[in-house]
Image (tube, rainbow, N blue to C red):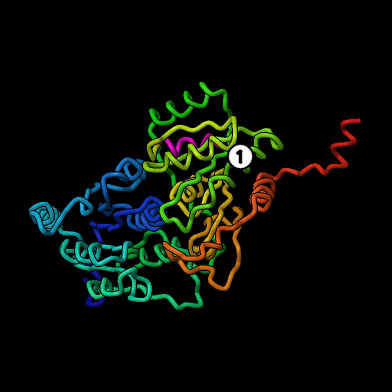
Amino acid sequence: MARNQRPAIRKILIVRLGSLGDIIHAMPAQQQLHRCLPLAEIHWLTETAYVPLLESVPGITRIWVAGLRKWSWRGSSRPFVQLIRALRREHFDLALDFQGLLKSAIVARLSGARLVAGFGPALTRERLASSFYSDRVAAKPEEKLHVVDLNLRLAERPGCTNGNHAPPFDSTAPRRAPIIPLEIPEAAGSRVRQKLAENRIERPILLNPGAGWATKLWPAGHYAQLAGRIQDELEIPVVLTYGPGEESIIEEVKQATSGCCSFPTSIPELAALCRESRLMIAGDTGPLHLAVALGTPTVAILGPSPIWRNGPYDPADLVVKRHLPCSNCLKRTCDQFICMNIAVEEVFDAVVRRLGIERRTRTDTDEHGQ
């Protein structure tokens, strides 16, 4: 081996525990690693809820469950010690921490990987996390990189593109939607198609009123008005999607409108539903980014999230947002909560434009009625 040549990368550990949208934003980086190092094993450390989704992603050798949400340091540390011991037995060449938290950085370091890469202190959610990395990714504020692009940059760390494999991601090339080749289980697709058939629905528009942060919520009444206009004016069926704990929001929307279908789905079933649908409307949420990754057109309703950082990655998708002095604060709570005061008309107009539908004017309607 030449003096300056790095050892080959044969086994990689990705640390991205959650959430759904963040995991989806890390998938293009995993796909890049798989293309550049097709013979390398890629392991992914996550939480239980996201295992079914990652099982559908090509190129992942093994999925590990961290279980960090259930552990208490006041109790037994045995599960954590057992996990670390098991990871160290794998002898990873590279660990990539896409999470940027202290807990994820510590696990990446304790995994025993020869190289541990993550983001610099300006890019991590907890600045101290970066001190656990042997290699750090930095970005200048003026670059305004999307989360997907940041993750792709991390996937270019030393050794990931050695040899005669595919070239690394070109950050100067025109951006394209990162369509993830998910291998959705046939059982999930069958259940979704059966449910749609039972409700006599074909090619619906999906509305996802929930969100992980209160500041990302568009009012349920607005979703109800939007659903009514889509059904009445566009004559397109609407399906409401939701996750655990969001049932009350769905009921509020359904009570304020009529004709909307809703049913709970697992993550694979939600992916199958996206493929059966013509559009997804949501805030900065996992379902929105899942739809984007699958190539389903989207309209995003953004509040505290910057468009350039968290908006739909496909440039063909549309974003409705109020531009205020306090915009892009990324705060989970707010005393004023005005950034989501977005009119239903604005969102409906974006829906029409994204679908490529020409809206009839009142004159056109009168002429056709004569």
Residue drawn at the location 26% of the way across and 49% of the way down? 47
Residues shaded magenta: 269-278
Residue nearest the observer in this picture, 356 or 347: 347
Q: Position of residue 273 (x, y in %)?
A: 48, 35
Image quadrant assignment for residue 110: bottom left
Q: Is residue 169 visible?
A: no
Q: Is 327 rendered above or below residue 366? A: below
Who is closer to the viewer here, 84 or 62? 84
Left or right of 250, for residue 202: right
Q: Say what amino acid the circle numbered 1 marks.
A: Ala
Indicate the secondary structure of the residue bearing disc 1.
helix
Quadrant position of residue 225: top right
Of residues 13 and 274, which is closer to you in this image?
274
Q: Nearer the viewer, residue 4 or 131?
A: 131
Q: Position of residue 141 (x, y in %)?
A: 47, 77
Judge whether residue 186 can be spotted in this image.
Answer: yes
Quadrant, the N terminus: bottom left
Q: Residue 264 in magenta?
A: no
Position of residue 237 in the picture relative to residue 216 (left or right): right
The percent coordinates of residue 262 (x first, y second) are: 49, 33
Q: Residue at x 25, y 72 (%)?
A: 133
Q: Identify the residue shown where x is 17% and y is 61%.
A: 111
Residue beneath disc 1: 227
